[in-house]
Amino acid sequence: MTYRHSLRKRVAIAFAVCVAVLSVVWGFAFFAAIKLSEDRAMTQQLQVAADSYPAVTMNPRGYDDIDSLPEPLRDWARSHPEEGTYEFTADEFHVAVIPSDNELGRAFVVYDVAGIEAESSEDWWWLLIISGVVGTLGVLGFGLGVMVIRRAVAPVAELAKVVAGIDLENLSAGDHKRIESSRFGDDEVGMLAETIEKTLERISAFVVRERDFTGSASHELRTPITVISGALELLEQSDLSAADVKVLDRVRRATREMKTTVDMFLCLARETDDERYDQQFLVAPVVSQAIEQQRHLLNGKNIGVDIDELANPSVFGHPQAFSIAVNNLVRNAFEHAFEGRAAVTVTIKEHELLIANQKSRNTDELYASTETPSSHGYGLGLGIVQRLCERNGWAFSLVIEETCVAARLSW
């Protein structure tokens, strides 16, 4: 369906049409009420005259003498009322006081409305009828307004329904075609639909490229690491000097760190990872493995590691992401710890992992700007851990005190 006018103009036209229709309906209603009142008053007056036939009295009547007035009005007339009109509800009289040339200087025009005005009970019935009519017109007006406005904004509701039907968590390459922006015309809604369609098209293309890239990168980056690891295993079987063994150990650690780094960045790059984000695993084995992998950083240092397992919790999430986060925290704690007894403490609780280390002399400089991770040092580790936690629904915080630094990973 295409529209000749913009959404703003259609809403304005719909509002104007609704107001015009309601105004016409109310106008006819008031006109009908006035005509009904006139006809009723005339009918009642004729009925009173017919009931008194043949002695038909003229109504209203004029009086120049107070004594000729109806008895209920005589005492009032003697009080010299001012010129004007008066109503006597109890006696059912309407009186007009006008100037005159008689001795009183006043004349009285009396309208006897007895039998003409409606009784109180009848007034209540008329009030009830009028209230019903007004209420009915109000409901009809509200329904008309809703119908007109809904028709005016129907394209927006249709677009919202189409967009709501798209699974944004699992976009496919053809999801953008479901919008069909051409059917919304060339107004504001059409422009919005076209923008959403193009945006989804770009996102879908990006998701496809991301999946292709991570799949290819995973193979291309891990292949040379596997080759290096195999070569190291062959070298270990050779007769090597003590110096060569140290070099071999350094190459092995660098290869292992490179493999961890590749896995880490591939894990962060993937939008989806084969539904591995809801696996359950134990925390203690992951922590023990991370400590053993990073223990070489403590070689030649008088730094102790104290592991306090207060619980044996299990975590839901991505096991590799958790391992990468723990390895980052353990490595940074080992690198920046001050030499001393039990300088690094690892505490495993039911819902959190706490890794604390005593501050070295240059810790303040190393931990500076942790909120904006840099491309080197501890800042990069914090940024990686933060992103991994956000992806898995975990919480990460870093507390820097005067004597120690505590990294807390909770779930």
Image (cartoon, grey):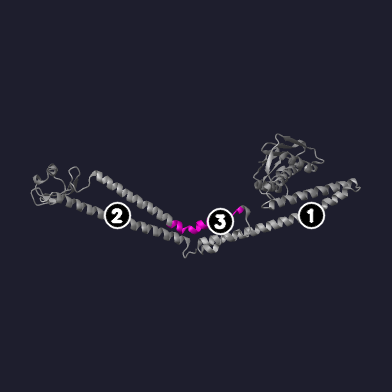
**Which of the 4 quarters of the picture holds residue 407?**
top right
Judging depth in this view, the residue of 132 and 230 nearest the camera is 132
Q: Is residue 375 visible?
A: no
Disc 3 marks a residue whose amino acid type is Val
Q: Which label's residue is closer to the chain start, 2 or 3?
A: 2
The residue pinned by badge 1 equals: 223
Disc 1 marks a residue whose amino acid type is Thr
- Secondary element under disc 3, as helix, strand or loop, is helix
Disc 2 marks a residue whose amino acid type is Phe
Give the distance between the C-alpha atoms of the residues marked 2 and 1, in whole angstroms: 89 Å
- Tell me where the magenta segment starts and ends, as one range: 148-168
- Secondary element under disc 1, as helix, strand or loop, is helix
Q: Are marks 2 and 3 in contact (CB under 8 Å)?
A: no
Residue placed at 30% from the left, 48% from the top?
Answer: 129
Q: Which label's residue is closer to the chain start, 3 or 1?
A: 3
Residue furthest bottom in the image:
4
Image location (x, y in percent) of residue 9: 45, 62
Badge 2 density bin: few <14, some 14–19, many ≥20, Cα 10 Å: few
The residue pinned by badge 2 equals: 30
Residue placed at 24% from the left, 52% from the top?
Answer: 37
Image location (x, y in percent) of residue 389: 66, 45
Give the distance between the C-alpha atoms of the residues marked 2 and 3, in whole angstroms: 47 Å
Badge 3 density bin: few <14, some 14–19, many ≥20, Cα 10 Å: some
Task: Tell me: 110 left or right of 129.
Answer: left
Q: Is residue 34 one of those drawn in magenta? A: no
**Which of the 4 quarters of the picture holds residue 292?**
top right
Image location (x, y in percent) of residue 66: 10, 45
The residue pinned by badge 3 equals: 163
